[in-house]
Amino acid sequence: MIETEDHLAFHASGRSAALYEPHYGPAPVVALSEASGAALRAADVLSPRGLLLLGGADDKDEFEAEEKSFGMERISPAEARAIVPILSERAVVRAAFADHAWDIDTDRLVQSFARTARDQGAEIVTGAAATAIRRDAGVWTVTTRKGEMRARTLVNAAGAWVDEVAKMAGVRPLGFTPLRRSMARIAAPGGHDVSTWPMMFGAGEAWYAKPDAGALIVSPAEEDPAAPHDAWADDMVLAEGLARYEEMVTAPVERLLASWAGLRTFAPDRLPVIGRDPTMPDFVWFAGQGGYGFQSAPANAALLADLLGGRPVGVAANIAEAVSANRFR
């Protein structure tokens, strides 16, 4: 495994909201997320969080659509305030709750994956940015800052850079778009103990907030196209998102403890792409996990292993086909 950065999970993976909500996303993603649940529990990386959906006077349709898609239970605004006491009595007119959402200890999960890979003979080479890729006599040669590396099969798992890697390898890019999402860390509102609060979503995913190490992380939930880069938060977008959050609560944001951004990368149809390139079968795509990467990671990896190992896939055939690169023929 060749990693550009000096350590794993530097970009989007290291900046994730880190929630396992298996109902989140389009149907093939939901299936892959649900299939990942047992592995995530076995890895002991999940802890209870819960999910609270909040709606105002003008977002009834968005609220009801998300309430249904997430399989949530309608509760009264008063019941929501009993869970999160800073919610505005005036602004919050609809609420729904679900307990099928868990925090993911993403660092522990990444280290577990890395340890398992190394135990099975894998070599993980960090600080090894690829500068050239060529294919001769059925063998790929990747030139990196740490020398040349060769293999008969090349798996492209470069996140926001997947199309750039494809171009370097002489393979047609598939049209992935990195989308920036910004985050702010704020102090616990009003000095409350936020540790038991659920993750909160504004209807229409206008914003979200989640307890994190005694503070709250708040996101405007934007999806602004960006070139692949080490992303940073846009101050104006962040301010607008924080304003939407403040409309629903009674505690104003007085200062930021920190801010950051990550790039969530999507294929044109917003589904992952997992499998061999239709024109270059020894070039394999593992890309476009968007905002669902951690929660679907075990099933995604198992699917890729089945495909490369020539085994029957462990997920439904229609799911494997839905995320196959063959749809880009």
Image (cartoon, rainbow, N blue to C red):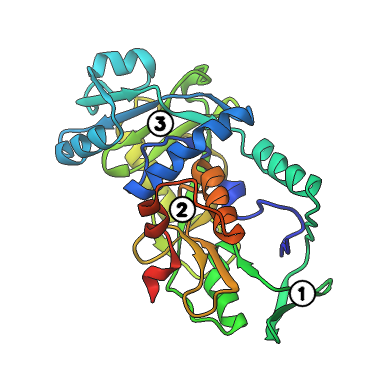
Q: Secondary structure at mark 1?
A: strand
Provide residue 189's location: percent of width, then percent of height: 47, 25
Name which residue type carries label 2.
Arg
Q: Secondary structure at mark 3?
A: loop
Packing grade of label 2 (10 A; few <14, some 14-19, many >=20) is many
- Which residue is pictured at 40% across the width and 61% down the height? 224
For residue 32, say whether it is visible: yes
Whether residue 144 sits left or right of residue 317 in the image: it is right
Q: Earlier in the sequence, mark 1 or mark 2?
A: 1
Query: Looking at the image, is mark 1 or mark 2 nearer the viewer?
Result: 1
Packing grade of label 3 (10 A; few <14, some 14-19, many >=20) is some
Provide residue 275's location: percent of width, then percent of height: 51, 63
Q: Earlier in the sequence, mark 3 or mark 2?
A: 2
- Which residue is pictured at 37% across the width and 21% down the height? 86
| Label drawn at residue 150 | 1
| Label drawn at residue 181 | 2
Q: Label 3 belongs to which residue?
A: 252
Query: Looking at the image, is mark 1 or mark 3 nearer the viewer?
Result: 1
Q: Earlier in the sequence, mark 1 or mark 3?
A: 1
Residue 34 position by quadrant: top left
- Which residue is pictured at 45% across the width and 41% down the height? 33
